[in-house]
Image (cartoon, rainbow, N blue to C red):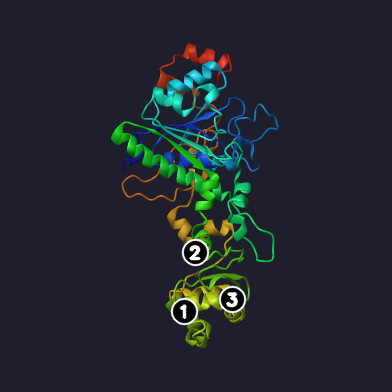
Amino acid sequence: MTTPVGALSHLRVLDLSRILAGPWATQMLGDLGADIIKIERPGSGDDTRGWGPPYADDITGDTAADAAARSAYFCSVNRNKRSLAIDITSEDGATILRDLAAHADILVENFKVGGLAKYGLDYETLRAINPALVYCSITGFGMNGPDAQRAGYDFMIQGMGGLMSVTGEPDGMPMKIGVALVDVLTGTNAATAILAAVMHAQRTGTGQHIDMSLFDVSVASLANQALNYLVSEKVPGRLGNAHPNIVPYQAFATADGHVILAVGNDSQFRKFCAVAGCNGLADDPAYATNRARVENRQELLPHITAVFQTQTTGWWLDKLAAVGVPAGPINSIDAVLDEPQARHRGLSASIADDLLGSVPTIASPMRLSETPPQATLPPPRLGAHSREVLSELLTMDSARLDKLVADGIIGDAS
């Protein structure tokens, strides 16, 4: 069978981003076939290479030897990329990157606002070289405004952006989400914006600058909670596992664990009540409609809490599934990946690796019938493709490459 050509195989991306949001965006593009050239500092590379344990590679404790290490964190967002280790702070390194920009369709960076201008790698400089270039800047607070110069990290943005104010138990401490979700959402939004800008560039020949802010994404991701406030002028608070606009829609303790009950409409509530043996609740005007249940949640929930504790988790899941009421377990990550659905969909996968044999990965969730995502390149060792990229795109010969390595301009792990 012929391997499908990726939908974005005609695009080349210079990825100057580190940590999570930018690499998440570029990994999405790489999964769809784009040529992602990951630009890293020689000798250290992306900060997340050292964010372990655990590590895919053996770690010796020798800082120099371990500089190219691949932590599990790094591996989670850097498949399908080629690593070019180059010192962009040097005149020669910056010149090489400008030359590469002439051959690129997209550049992604997450330096501080204005941080690349001193190297001649800002948007205005590069669009003079390549007018069709799509240049995406990812920052904590955006390219303008009173906080533009502030550094921004996911955790602090989850707090400042409002997500933590609606996460956690009502009488407990505000809680962050268990993964760096603002970074992930920013990366996903960035990938969408990049593809929109590429479509525009292909039609007009004109690229553009994308200003992507973690803070903006955090606020936009408040979704119904933000609109609840704007419509009612009542500030939403923490509801634990409950939903502000739907009841019952939360986790309940069973006789031996927990079940998430996700009743989305009045018909499902009636079916739940039939399984639970409490049809009277569905017939009661105080609970018959979702609006009534939201308004009377404090009176309703003790009844539901008590009935759930009479049966096991397995019993509830079987009975509710049989009548089409959405319910599910609270899985640990090992249990998630062992779910029959997860195994059927191939969510836990691996990528062939020359050094390790294979590297584990989580499959892309994007399923395209004609151009499905492919996991063809493992997360790269630092500088593993420096010679390959520069000889391929800038036709550098081995003598020039040897001198660049000797001068410390590029790193070479090939």
Quarter of the figure that contains the N terminus: top left
- Of the image marks 1 and 3, the number of the one nearer the N terminus: 1
Which percent across, then down, holds residue 378?
49, 37
Residue at the spot of label 1: 289
Give the total of numbered labels: 3
Q: Which residue is drawn at 58% across and 17% down?
A: 408
Frontmost residue, 139 versus 403? 139
Relative to residue 404, is residue 40 depicted above or below? Answer: below
Residue at the spot of label 2: 231
246 on left or right of 166: left
Which percent across, then down, holds residue 176?
63, 54
Q: Dot 3 lies on which element?
A: loop
The answer for how far apart the CA atoms under marks 2 and 3 are is 40 Å
Relative to residue 72, is residue 235 depicted above or below? Answer: below
152 on left or right of 192: right
Q: Dot 2 lies on which element?
A: helix
Residue at the spot of label 3: 312
270 on left or right of 48: left
Q: Dot 1 lies on which element?
A: loop
Confirm or deny contact between disc 2 and disc 3 (CB under 8 A). Answer: no
Tag 3: residue type? Thr
Tag 2: residue type? Val
* Residue 212 visible in image: yes
Q: Which residue is drawn at 45% across and 52% down?
A: 346
